[in-house]
Amino acid sequence: MPDIINLLPENIANQIAAGEVIQRPASAVKELMENAIDAGATEIKLIVNDAGKSLIQVIDNGKGMSETDARMCFERHATSKINNIDDLFHIKTMGFRGEALASIAGVSQVELKTRKQGEPVGTYIEIDNSVVRTQKPVACPEGTNISMKNLFFTVPARRNFLKSDSRELKHIIEEFTRIALAFPDIFFSLTSNGQEVFHLDRGPLKQRIISILGKNYQSKLVSVKEQTDYINIIGFVGKPETAKKTRGDQYFFVNNRFIKSAYLNHAVVNAFAEMIPKDTFPMYVLFIDIDPSRLDINVHPTKQEIKFEDEKVIYAFVNSAVRHSLAQFSITPSLDFELDADVQRQEAISGPFTTEQKASAMSGALYQTFTKGNQAHFIESKSNLESLDLLYGKRSASADPYQVQPEFQPEPLTVSGKPVNQDWVQVGNSYILVEIENGFWLIHQQHAHERVLYERIESALKDNPIAVQKSLFPEVLELSPADSALLAELQNDLFLLGYMIEPFGTNSYVIHGTPADVMKGNEKKAIEELLEEFKHFNLSPDYSEREKLMRAMARQQSIKAGTKLTDKEIHALVDDLLACRVMNTTPGGKPVFLEFGYPDIEKMFGR
């Protein structure tokens, strides 16, 4: 029998590797910008066309590359950052695998211009499907200018899986935002289809946060700063009034690298306990500085998931630092918490320090809060820490901690009776009692209104647009770049639902009209809340874009529980519900009403 195992051709191997490293245009943006940072750049410009599908260009003023390095950087596993196995445990750079440029060259057409500092001329390289087509000297500024064109032209099937331009641009903005937040001492700009989206001058972290996340945070940020020999934590958290119903403005950085951690997110949320509603999420931008040997960042190709030497200790420090900052700014009263001595006995805390280091650490303010009662700090008890598995459920290491599962869809309720009169009454400002032929319904008013609105919106998007009520004095709506990209994506469908919104400069829109049921003076708030609701549904991949919008608008505009209704409003709501195609469940499958039969009620009373 002949031998059947062969080495893959280089271009095919690169395309396979690209499947892990370059999943979409935003993945390439991340890799190229991180390379620019590692090159010591103080100015980084990102240019994209067609949401990165036709062009992604990164221009930096870093140290540049020699002719040999410019050619070598496109080889697989070629890197300047790893020389031996020990280097893997002391990584302080952003990139280190040596896969990114090889993967990019395998799925796009690449042009590179680079000149090393002090060299008279630079190097120009053109690569097509991992094959070097051109290499020659070129006159260019010091630094690197790299362009990747026609992403996935070698694998059209993968290109077909990309989303709309607005959606892919949103992902690019997310990656750009994470990197720009991590390095406020670097100038960044982002230009999309010739229009500048971001222009971020160098400055303090607070200025960078406000420039990216919006002016709403101007006076609503609380500084976090705790320093010990084991870990340093700095950054900002938003005041309780900035908490939102959806995730989005939550950023953790470990050694300036963005990470996702549901476990540490819980540490922050827990620090806000009883200050924000349970279904909301606080804003935070927090930087953890720790010895690289105490963590492993080489656990996933995107490097967004890492492992700590002792995660419980990190949890305790983060939770304590946020509580301490909130207490210092008189946002939360001083609280008395029991001390969990197990944390102090962790080998990661006590083992590495010499006697002198321990004495220095014990004199610090943060250590004192761990060792004295009656402090504003709080260390989660061991049993509570272990209960997080119950809170988040058993999940694989590769599961997305921000993924929201679709709502449970119960079997439709059986409707056996019909209303026999119109003596309908509201109880508890949340429910409506409706008598039927042999019993009564207990209707949840918010769920009922959500069903009514959903079917009305569904009809509007199909063939019956909602009339626009034009505003006498149009309002200007200013959004963050990410929300601006999202609104642009929804703009056409929103017009069918009664919203007349037009772009008005960078990240700004003019509201010319809204549906008739939106109160005057509430137009901006209505759109902002709608975007928040949409982002909630946007976390689930199981719905179409239009379905997400329908559900988001129905939930956002529905009458909330606890709202007092007039008799006229009660009758209108019940009449509208009875006219629905599906009247007994919300779009998410929750019951609209419960049915109680008189025979069953008699049995309850022993009759």
Image (tube, rainbow, N blue to C red):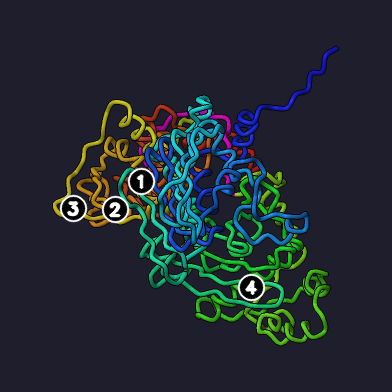
Q: Report if residue 409 lies within the magenta region.
A: yes
At label 3, the amino acid type is Pro
Residue identified by numbered label 3 = 474
Q: Nearer the viewer, mark 1 or mark 4?
A: 1
From the top left corner, tell me how far across and down residue 30 is, in percent: 52, 49
Q: As shown in the figure, which amino acid type bears the numbered disc 2?
A: Thr
State which tag comes first along the sequence, 2 or 1: 1
- Mark 3 and mark 4 lie on one chain; the one further toward the N terminus is 4
- Where residue 365 sits, quadrant-wise, is bottom right
Which residue in the protein does label 1 denote? 192
Q: Which mark is residue 232?
A: 4
Q: Is residue 455 magenta?
A: no
Q: CA distance from mark 2 to mark 1?
A: 11 Å
Above/below status of 136 relative to 523: above
Q: Nearer the viewer, residue 395 or 603?
A: 395
Q: Residues within 10 Å of mark 1 (few under 14, many from 20)?
A: some
